[in-house]
């Protein structure tokens, strides 16, 4: 997948567990794992907004594009 979601990095910086994060944004830990492992096909803007609010970041801090041949 050419879009990578770097939630692990931000969670480590905030010293936040996956469970705390999931509870704060209103999704299940299983769905956090889907995001972290690159298996997500889509992310709702409301979820992205909640992620950025909880992690106090901008979308560009957690989303990055990797060209197909590098990923």
Image: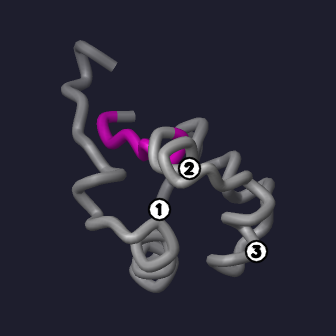
Residue pointed to by mark 3: 23
Q: Secondary structure at mark 1?
A: loop
Query: Magenta segment range?
Result: 2-8
Residue 21 at x, y percent in the picture: 67, 64
Query: Which residue appears at 76% of the width and 74% of the height?
Result: 23
Tell me where residue 37 appears, x and y as whole percent. Answer: 60, 36
Q: Is residue 69 left or right of residue 35?
A: left
Q: Is residue 46 magenta?
A: no
Report which residue position mark 1 lands on: 42
The answer to whether the residues at label 1 and label 2 have Cβ atoms under 8 Å apart is no
Say which of 63 and 1 sits in front: 63
Separation of marks 1 and 3 at Cα, in angstroms? 20 Å
In which quadrant of the rendered image does the N terminus lie? top left
- Label 1 or label 3, whichever comes before in sequence order: 3
Q: Tell me the CA gap for discs 1 and 2.
A: 20 Å
Taking 53 as reference, is 38 above or below it? above
Q: Relative to 66, does residue 55 appear above or below in the rendering?
A: below
**Marking on residue 11:** 2
The first of marks 2 and 3 along the sequence is 2
């Amino acid at each position: 997948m050419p879009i990578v979601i770097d939630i692990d990095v931000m969670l480590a910086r905030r010293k936040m567990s996956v469970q705390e994060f999931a509870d704060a944004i209103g999704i299940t830990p299983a769905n956090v794992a889907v995001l972290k492992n690159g298996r997500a096909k889509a992310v709702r803007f409301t979820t992205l907004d909640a992620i950025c609010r909880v992690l106090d970041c901008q979308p560009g801090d957690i989303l990055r594009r990797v060209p197909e041949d590098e990923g």
